[in-house]
Amino acid sequence: MARGDEGRVRPVTKLYEDLVAVERDAGMPSAFSWRGRRYEVRDVIGRWRIEGRWWEDGRDREYWRVEARGGAVLDLYEDRRAGRWHLERLWD
């Protein structure tokens, strides 16, 4: 956590954009492999989608904020046009 200008604590994130292999159960991520290691998803914290003209590249992404076993919180997304998964962000 970092302190903002007004002394408030705010989360720190690290951006990766790495390709990952994702396993699904009932349509939701249940595990993923990243940098040669397999991580089990303990909880799905959130889900959202970005579609359309952002901006003019026609993105179609489905995002999942997950908690991996061990407590790490990460944002994964599926690039639905390319059929690939990415690990976008790791939260501290």
Image (cartoon, rainbow, N blue to C red):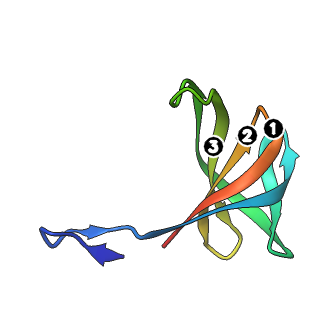
Badge 1: residue crowd in 10 Å (few <14, some 14–19, many ≥20): few
Instruction: Give percent across and percent down for residue 26.
Output: 84, 38
Q: Secondary structure at mark 2?
A: strand
Mark 1: amino acid: Ala
Front: mark 3 or 2: 2
**In this view, 36 is above or below 76:** below
Q: Which residue is mark 3?
A: 63
Q: Which residue is mark 1?
A: 82
Instruction: Give percent across and percent down for residue 27.
Output: 81, 37
Residue appearing at x 12%, y 68% in the figure:
6
Mark 3: amino acid: Tyr
Sequence-first disc among 3 and 2: 3
Mark 3 to mark 1 CA distance (whole Å): 14 Å
Residue appearing at x 80%, y 59% in the figure:
20
Q: Which mark is residue 79?
A: 2
Q: Is residue 67 left or right of residue 6?
A: right
Q: Is residue 68 left or right of residue 25?
A: left
Quick check: marks 3 and 1 in contact, CB under 8 Å?
no
